Amino acid sequence: MGKHIVEDQLIENKDFSGKAPDAEKYDCCRFVNCDLSGADLSNIHFLECTFNDCDLSNATLAQTAFRDIQFINCKLIGLNFQDCNPFLLQMSFTDCQLELASFYQLKLKNTRFQNCNLQEADFTETDLTNSTFETCDLFQAIFDQTILEKADLRTALHYSIDPENNRIRKARFSREGIVGLLDRYDIEVEG
């Protein structure tokens, strides 16, 4: 039986853990409470889909297409998003666990991260122009040669961003958050 296209479907309480889903393309589908942890999502196209309360931790994303995707309250630990198909890549994340996720060299302009745990996420050489990190924990997240121009980090927490090693022109930070821009200088800011 060959792979097929699934359109406008609610896919609920399915266990795809450790295997590949049945279809090669999901268009305008809603995944709810699905276990895709360790699943092989290679070469699968997800177009205008929403993932609610799903676990995709450690899934394989070789050439996976995520186009206009919303992840809501999902567990996305250890995902190598840099393996995705970069063509028209567009995602948003709300209330997600993204610890140890890698976004290496991706173009993620205008991406919204809202109330996400991004501890130890890798944003090396990622273009995050005009992206928003609203109430996100960025403890030990890696920013190296990252483009953060016009990004909004006013409510982000625990970040350490070297302004000499990253492009931060017109990025927005809170007064309290400025400390995260001074870490490389090993100084103490009081008051």
Image: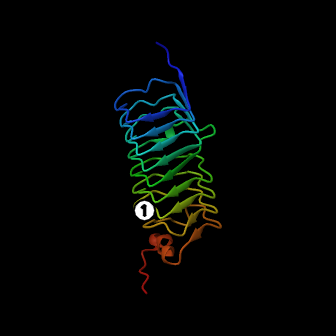
- Image point (45%, 23%), residue name: 22
Q: Where is residue 54 in the image (x, y as percent from the top left)?
A: 40, 42
The residue under the point 40% across, 52% down is 97
- Is 111 or 164 nearer to us in this picture? 111
Q: Is residue 67 left or right of residue 21?
A: right
Front residue of 32/186: it is 32
1 w.r.t. 123: above or below: above
| Residue for point 37% across, 31% down | 16
Seen from the viewer's position, the closer of residues 58 and 134 is 134
Assess disc 1: are there few (<14), some (14-19) or many (≥20) residues with their C-alpha within 10 Å of its C-alpha.
many
- Which residue is nearer to you in this view: 191 or 93? 93
- Rendered position, 43 above or below 121: above
Q: Position of residue 137 (x, y in %)?
A: 42, 62
Secondary structure type for disc 1:
loop
Horizontal and vertical percent position of residue 118: 43, 56
Q: Mark 1 points at which residue?
A: 137
State which quarter of the image contains the C terminus.
bottom left
